[in-house]
Amino acid sequence: MTSVDMEPKRQFVLSLLVSNHFGVLTRISGLFARRGFNIDSLTVGVTENPEYSRMTIVSQGDEYIREQMVRQLRKLEDVKVVRLMPEDNTVMRELLLVKVKLEPGKLSEIVEAANTFRANIVDLSPDSVLIEITGDKSKLEALIEYYKPYGIIEISRTGITAVGRSKNTLVRDDEKGSDV
């Protein structure tokens, strides 16, 4: 057994610049499925250039799996750039919407907690409060745990989106000369 064989599975984040047209997401998710790799979260959105979308994929695996996924993704025609995002040089955020049951007399407690977490109240009805928060996974998990005793009605999460710090930019080779 080599040291790579013994390496534990770790979460990793891939950032991709892809062509913005139909079928691209299917081909990329199919690549993961054919190799038996799970996608923990996936976010996709158009970039400043409408010809391209930025995709953030979170998965798990050892060094071999990470490198295999990068190599396989780079072979796809619609994939322009693939980068493993290092935790120490990347800003990663997730959006969470959580609907909490509103009991009589509890609104001020719910609002105060939202303010403490730097979350926003985005909808209020007689029976529920909808809270929006962005942050890292631990912050979102802490908010969820706090509101559990109030009664969580519904949760929706975006998954992680990531952008490199400073000059760690996701650009096509022909735009900047190299995949920085």
Image (cartoon, rainbow, N blue to C red):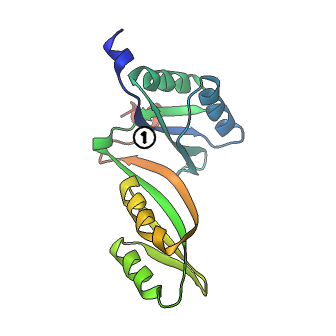
Residue 29, position in %: x, y?
Answer: 63, 34
Q: Which residue is drawn at 61% across and 83% down?
A: 127
Residue sitting nearer the eye, 126 or 148:
148
Q: Nearer the viewer, residue 101 or 61?
A: 101
**The C terminus sits in image quarter:** top left
Q: Give the vertical position of 41 relative to 111 (above or below).
A: above
Residue 74: horizontal and vertical position, in percent?
Answer: 53, 25
Is 11 on the left-hand or right-hand side of 47?
Answer: left
| Tag 1: amino acid | Leu
Q: How many residues crowd mark 1 within 10 Å: few (<14), some (14–19), many (20+)? A: many
- Residue at x 44%, y 80% (from the top left corner): 110
152 vs 13: above or below? below
Image x and y of residue 118, in percent: 36, 72
Q: Nearer the viewer, residue 98 or 166?
A: 98
One can see residue 77 in this view: no
Q: In which quarter of the image is residue 4?
A: top left
Res 163 seen here: yes
Q: Residue furthest top?
A: 1
SS class of the residue under badge 1? loop
From this viewpoint, which residue is outermost toward the bottom?
Answer: 105
Q: In this view, does 121 lie above or below 163?
A: below
Residue found at x 47% / y 32%: 82
Q: In this view, does 123 lie to the left or right of 120?
A: right
Foreground residue among 144 and 163? 144
Q: Position of residue 62 (x, y in %)?
A: 40, 25
Which residue is at the far right?
A: 22
Q: Mark 1 points at which residue?
A: 170
Q: Residue at x 33, y 75 (%)?
A: 116
